[in-house]
Image (cartoon, helix red, strand yellow):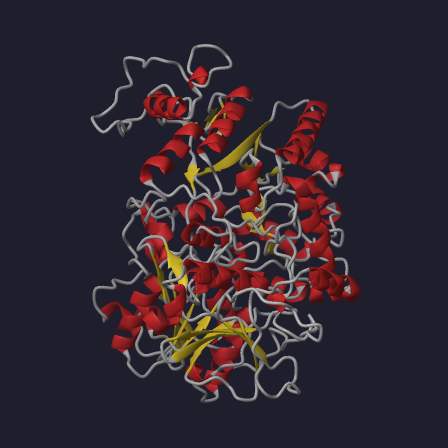
Amino acid sequence: MHTETPLFSYPKYWAECYGTAPFLPMSREEMDLLGWDSCDVIIVCGDAYVDHPSFGMAVIGRLLESQGYRVGIIAQPNWQSKADFQKLGKPNLFFAVSAGNMDSMINRYTADLKVRHDDAYTPNNEGGKRPDRAVTVYSQRCREAYKDIPIVIGGIEASLRRMAQYDYWSDKVRPSVLLNSKADILLYGNAERAISEVALRVSRGELPKDMTNIRGTVCLIKELPENWEQKDSSRVDVPKKVSDKDHPFKQNPYTVMEPGDNASSSEQQDNTETVNCASKKDEALKELEQNSTQVIRFLPLKGRDQPKDQEYILLPSYEKVSKDPVLYAHTSRILHLETNPSNAQVIVQPHGKRYVWVNPPPIPLSTDELDSVFEHAYQRVPHPAYGDAKIPAYDMIRFSVNIMRGCFGGCTFCSITEHEGRVIQSRSEDSIINEIERIRDQTPGFTGTISDLGGPTANMYQLNCRTEEIHASCRRLSCVYPSICKNLVTDHSPTTQLYRRARALPGVKRILIASGLRYDLAVEDPEYIKELVTHHVGGYLKIAPEHTEDGPLSKMMKPGMGTYNRFKELFEKYSQEAGKKQYLIPYFISAHPGTRDIDMMNLALWLKGNGFRADQVQNFYPSPMASATAMYHSERDPLHRVNYKTEKVNIPKGIKQRRLHKAFLRYHDPENWPLLREALKDMGKAHLIGYGKKHLIPPTQPKSATRNTSGSAKAKKSSATSKMRKGYIHTQHTGLPPRKQK
């Protein structure tokens, strides 16, 4: 197993004598009050500064402060000039640049490429306070302000753009943000380990651009190291015979016939647990012999006696993947197979005459380390400079507690894998309880309700592989798809115990669970569902089946509706036993890769048959580096091996088709009926037009719903179904009446 320097064992920087700041300073006046003549590190961020462990700048800032560094904050600077980037003076060590808790493009634009006029991470929800491609713009301004100061970039925008990535907004593949920003080093994921190492080495005189061996970082190099072994995966090759002398564990891992290639779901599960865990070599060898082709040619360099950890995988260049969608899909597949910190290798991608060197993911934090991260001296409120201004993102989480990091679900449309990773990092029960008590005692406006105990998912707390040895050899893309891995611990009792202890605290009236629930895991532990439903559901519980049809579900890596129905039965059973009327709120995605018009029609019929009326829906949004985004761009499925003969995936790309898929989700909105009538007739499904219960939509329009000349629905919302009513909460759920706000 890999080991790392314990997070809090680094020697303290000399400035630790200044102690802990009430808030990290945002002005020279605050620095003067603290007795600082300068900052050691200045964090530049696209979010407003909220001193809370749910906000990245606060976590990194307080961590560096605990290690003795003086940290200043430049939040949401005016990027039109360098002036705001000079207001705290020149940092002694480096600028740390982040777009914020969201990618700046996703923050600014909808899935339909329309400009958002709000920003939850900005005071008063005001939009337009950060630039497009904020990491690049901020870095350029930092360089203009002080040419000789190193720039370290990180956060989710940097993570998702660390190598060549398809960019939905420009509809092209863009190079690594490390090149465009001209930063010295990129930190990806939750970067506590990496930033600690970088800060220490910079403080000792080393330049970040020369740091090539830190896990969880990306750097630029001019030449490939001669003493490393290369695994060449730079092209999709013509199939050829596998030599008898070729050993599958001595060659490029992507030459081995991999689980899921032309296999059924059940076959994929069996193969995945056998080959990917590398626990039964004989079976893997037998599988190799049965397959007569390999797709990626392995071109070993000299020096096979080099240590195994001195190997890298050579990817197709940026120039090639930007022009060849098949190579892009292939590259995406390799990236996602190299995400296990215990066995991931360095991946290298040429960009012109230089190479983007992507080090393996960081070693996850231990429970003690994660506890310490959450127990810094956070004020848990926005910086006083914002006065009484409301910051919606803070209001949403101020009474919630993050109990874990990571997600092993592997949903292809989600960016958690590319950022936080698949390994679950859990806090201790004591640490969580202590934070609840701090909220109770210190957070203004607390009335007794904890709004959430969760994280990326609500019920993966302390769930991991049965043994470290099995995990160390695993290469599965998901622990729960196509079925739950037999080596995954699914016991929810630690979560159940946490809930019981939390709600027993004096002054805590109610504990709600607002994070999304992984219901395919929950059904493995009915006792957990009973506990959740009886005590922690505030009338509605949100879950995400995402679709009803196997085609799109297989491209999402989501379970089928059979699991949903099992959960629904248990949810209703325990709600009835508790004497409560409670309802599930299912979420669905339209226009996801692999979705046909008929799939959306069937989903709409299911929604109507079950009495659901979606108030708000989400069209698929291709976020950088996600597997589903690779599908969207390449029209190939990178969940399986790809070549130039690989069957294309159906991709709803055109505006009209994406609008149609969204309209099916909102079948009940009269403004969508003209579009749906036209589509149903074209599909040969006109029998679904009528006034009966088995009909999807009526044949006529109400007088209040009209069409414009283009045939699309008017922007005006139907008062019967979509008009926002003051004093009510509108959510995506059944046609139940909206809840009055309390």
517 in relation to 31, above or below: above
Image side of residue 368 versus residue 735, left or right: right
Q: Position of residue 348 (x, y in %)?
A: 49, 74
Q: Position of residue 55 (x, y in %)?
A: 46, 57
Q: Nearer the viewer, residue 635 or 79?
A: 635
The answer to whether any part of residue 94 appears in the image is yes
Q: Quadrant of residue 8?
A: bottom right
Image side of residue 581 versus residue 168, left or right: right
Q: Nearer the viewer, residue 717 or 370?
A: 717
* Residue drawn 54% across the image and 25% down it: 606
Q: Position of residue 323 (x, y in %)?
A: 36, 63
Q: Nearer the viewer, residue 578 or 294?
A: 294
**What is the tally of numbered marks visible in this picture?**
0
Q: Position of residue 23 (x, y in %)?
A: 43, 64
Q: Nearer the viewer, residue 191 or 299?
A: 299
Image side of residue 580 versus residue 219, left or right: right
User: The N terminus appears in which quarter of the rendering?
Assistant: bottom right
The answer to whether any part of residue 505 appears in the image is no
* Residue drawn 66% across the image and 45% down it: 265
Image side of residue 279 versus residue 619, left or right: right
203 in relation to 652, above or below: below
